[in-house]
Image (cartoon, rainbow, N blue to C red):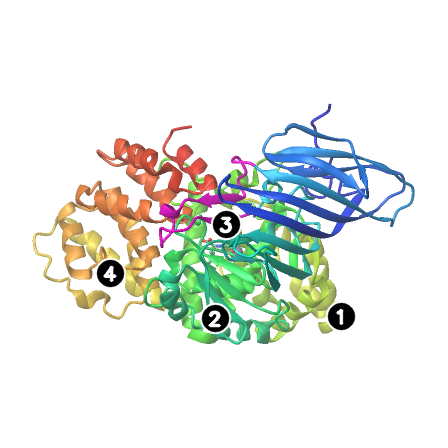
């Protein structure tokens, strides 16, 4: 049997999405903590797109397919060998469907296995409360196929419903419509019902099950988590409604009914994931001072950019993330001032410069619209970091680059067309035009031109034509124009970093005091520390003094802790090693653990410690994170 996937608009799926499309899917699941799997069925409502369809090909990854039913008939199916990172195509022979536009249903009985990367089953010890197991899913970009046999492509949008039987509370990326007790009382099991009536791509279908409690923090927002952290979570995220309301002012009315938050156990590998109706976030956002809530503004912005208007292939990933960062910063600018927005944008620009330097200005990894070849693993492409150098940071990955280059692209276009008065009405029109569809960079650009010409006439075309589109979209390296962000907030941190750098040979350090950073925001402290990772490793004497004066080690902001640990590891400051080990074993967010594992692995007397620490805590990490850490520290 030929393994080569067919060519469609999306090279990351093997499904025959050019012949049939899924319109709706219904999940009937049992969450089995004893066997650590989900078992049950999915019913797919499909429609043929062409005449004479004889088979349906779906994506799967390590799923155990038991049967495929077509009405009362059981159908023949074949699960192919795995193809590269795309998993195993499931080919189902169906009775021939003569005409395009015919609706039909398939019901597939299956269960997940321990290799399914989309689901992580946690033991009670891996949770905060320590008494109950936990399950959560993470499907972006192409792990949806490791939870559901489906057309796992962002170009396919479906509505879904679900009935999930479990002995612990269940939440999903959908609205809850009811809960049924088991008929024979006393089993402790309940069935939770959900529906998602706005069509979404498969990577946004998500579930979490655990000892969950909810607390309302806004008119359409409940925060869910284990009871031990509910109070802190409710406090930390209390600005959520103002972010949503600002998003609505900028774009269109919030579409999804509810915007709930789920704070996951510490092994959640990302900062946030924009699952519709229910954003998933890492507990490392609980800094105690709301200093990490930009992640919430970011995930809320995905409600429009990504979730309503979706990239149709991972090659156009920037359409999700660049647009989202752009809206996130508009929201932050509205609420906290333009200077804050400029500061964020400037940090992003400088990080982009570092990435381009690190990858090399001709590297394909610096192209906004990369050439994701057939079979390439988007996870790997997104998160591979160039090795060596000092600034061993996950921020230098393609995923991060797409966020930043994409933001700058939109920022530049906004300026060229005449600023927010012209651009903001266009953003709204863009969402209205493409809501509930999946698009490519070309679709996006075509509508931009159409809108601008129609609304502002041909003189606007002259303006748009001054933009070097090819350079922005297809060429590697830095963008063709430097936007020149305001440096006022950044200057103070950079000056202070310079002073410390120049003090490396001085006996007398009395010029420094705690007052230096007294008025700094968390973001400014981070920029200060980032500057120090750019210079030659600092003498240990300075590190010790700095911590005495600025009290970085006890700081609870995880982004700041990352930078501080990096500054210490770059100079192999061994007294900090126990703190680093503590930080990388108490949470598993890849942004923090991967660069620190890499640096520890490189630091003096750190290599064995990195390996030992990883091996001891291996089962704590999410499978996606574990795989990447193993590469980072040379185990595979
Ligand atoms: N959608 C992303 C997370 C993601 C990207 C998961 C690619 C899997 C593959 C999410 O919206 C995101 O960008 N999260 C960032 C935070 C944000 C403020 C930049 C993160 O997790 O750090
Ligand atoms: Zn995002």
Determine contact: label 4, label 1, CB under 8 Å.
Answer: no
Helix, strand or loop status at disc 3? strand
Determine contact: label 2, label 4, CB under 8 Å.
Answer: no
Helix, strand or loop status at disc 1? helix
Question: Is 10 above or below relative to 467?
Answer: above
Give me the residue at 46% from left, 59% from top: 212
Q: For residue 136, which numbered disc appears in the image?
A: 3
Q: Is residue 441 visible?
A: yes
Distance Cα–Cα, label 2 vs label 4: 34 Å
Extreme residue toward the top, this view: 1
Question: Is 39 above or below relative to 414?
Answer: above
Determine contact: label 3, label 2, CB under 8 Å.
Answer: no
Determine contact: label 3, label 1, CB under 8 Å.
Answer: no
Q: For residue 454, which numbered disc appears in the image?
A: 1
Q: Earlier in the sequence, mark 3 or mark 2?
A: 3
Give me the residue at 35% from left, 68% from top: 488
Q: Give how far across and how far down residue 282 sits, in percent.
A: 42, 55
Front: mark 1 or 2:
2
Q: Give how far across and how far down residue 454 sits, in percent.
A: 76, 70
- How many other residues sit within 10 Å of disc 3, few (<14), some (14-19) or many (≥20)? many
Q: For residue 496, which numbered disc appears in the image?
A: 4
Indicate whether residue 114 is drawn in magenta: yes
Q: Earlier in the sequence, mark 1 or mark 2?
A: 2
Indicate whether residue 197 is drawn in magenta: no
Left/right placement of residue 403 relative to residue 100 reads left
Q: For residue 240, which numbered disc appears in the image?
A: 2
């Amino acid at each position: 049997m030929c393994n080569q996937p067919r060519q469609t608009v999306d090279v990351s799926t093997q499904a025959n999405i050019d012949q049939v499309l899924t319109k709706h899917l219904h999940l009937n699941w049992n969450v089995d903590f004893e066997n650590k799997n989900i078992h049950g069925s999915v019913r797919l409502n499909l429609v043929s797109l062409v005449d004479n369809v004889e088979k349906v090909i779906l994506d799967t990854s390590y799923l155990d397919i038991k049967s495929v039913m077509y009405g009362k008939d059981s159908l023949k199916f074949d699960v192919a060998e795995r193809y590269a990172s795309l998993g195993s195509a499931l080919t189902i022979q169906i009775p021939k469907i003569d005409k395009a536009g015919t609706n039909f249903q398939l019901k597939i009985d299956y269960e997940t296995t321990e290799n399914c990367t989309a689901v992580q089953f946690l033991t009670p010890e891996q949770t905060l409360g320590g008494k109950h197991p936990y399950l959560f899913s993470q499907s972006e970009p192409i792990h949806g196929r490791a939870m559901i046999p489906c057309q796992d492509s962002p170009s396919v949008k479906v509505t879904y419903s679900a009935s999930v039987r479990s002995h612990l509370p269940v939440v999903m990326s959908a609205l809850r419509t009811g809960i049924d007790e088991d008929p024979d009382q006393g089993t402790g099991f309940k069935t939770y019902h959900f529906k998602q009536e706005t069509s979404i791509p498969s990577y946004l279908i998500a579930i979490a099950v655990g000892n969950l409690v909810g607390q309302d923090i806004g008119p359409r927002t409940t925060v869910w988590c284990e009871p031990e952290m509910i109070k802190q979570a409710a406090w930390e995220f209390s600005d959520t409604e103002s972010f949503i309301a600002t998003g609505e002012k900028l774009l269109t009315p919030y579409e999804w009914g509810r915007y709930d938050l789920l704070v996951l156990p510490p092994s959640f590998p990302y900062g946030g994931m924009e699952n519709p109706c229910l954003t998933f976030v890492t507990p490392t956002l609980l800094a105690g001072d709301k200093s990490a809530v930009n992640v919430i503004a970011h995930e809320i912005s995905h409600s429009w950019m990504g979730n309503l208007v979706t990239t149709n292939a991972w090659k156009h990933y920037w359409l999700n993330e660049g647009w989202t960062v752009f809206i996130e910063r508009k929201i932050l600018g509205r609420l906290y001032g333009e200077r804050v927005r400029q500061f964020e944008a400037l940090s992003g620009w400088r990080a982009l410069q570092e990435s381009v330097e690190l990858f090399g200005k001709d590297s394909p990894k610096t192209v906004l619209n990369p050439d994701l070849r057939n079979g390439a693993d988007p996870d790997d492409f997104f998160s591979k970091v160039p090795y060596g150098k000092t600034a061993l940071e996950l921020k230098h990955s393609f995923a991060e680059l797409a966020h930043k280059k994409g933001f700058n692209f939109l920022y530049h276009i906004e300026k060229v067309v005449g600023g927010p008065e012209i651009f903001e009405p266009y953003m709204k029109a863009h969402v209205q035009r493409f809501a509930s569809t999946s698009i490519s960079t070309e679709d996006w650009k075509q509508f931009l031109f159409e809108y601008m010409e129609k609304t502002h006439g041909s003189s606007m075309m002259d303006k748009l034509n001054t933009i070097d589109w090819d350079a922005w979209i297809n060429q590697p390296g830095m963008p063709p124009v430097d936007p020149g962000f305001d440096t006022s907030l950044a200057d103070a941190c950079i000056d202070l970093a310079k002073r410390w750098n120049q003090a490396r040979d001085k006996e007398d350090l009395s010029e420094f005091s705690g007052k230096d950073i007294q008025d700094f925001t968390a973001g400014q402290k981070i920029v200060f520390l980032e500057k120090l990772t750019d210079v030659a490793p600092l003498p240990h004497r300075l590190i010790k003094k700095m911590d005495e004066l600025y009290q970085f080690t006890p700081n609870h902001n995880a982004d700041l802790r990352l930078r501080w640990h990096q500054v210490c590891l770059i100079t192999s400051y061994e007294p900090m090693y126990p703190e680093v080990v503590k930080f990388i074993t108490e949470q598993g967010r890849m942004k923090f653990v991967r660069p620190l594992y890499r640096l520890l692995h490189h630091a003096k007397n750190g290599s064995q410690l990195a390996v030992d620490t990883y091996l001891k805590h291996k089962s704590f990490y999410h499978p996606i994170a574990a795989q990447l850490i193993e590469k980072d520290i040379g185990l595979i």
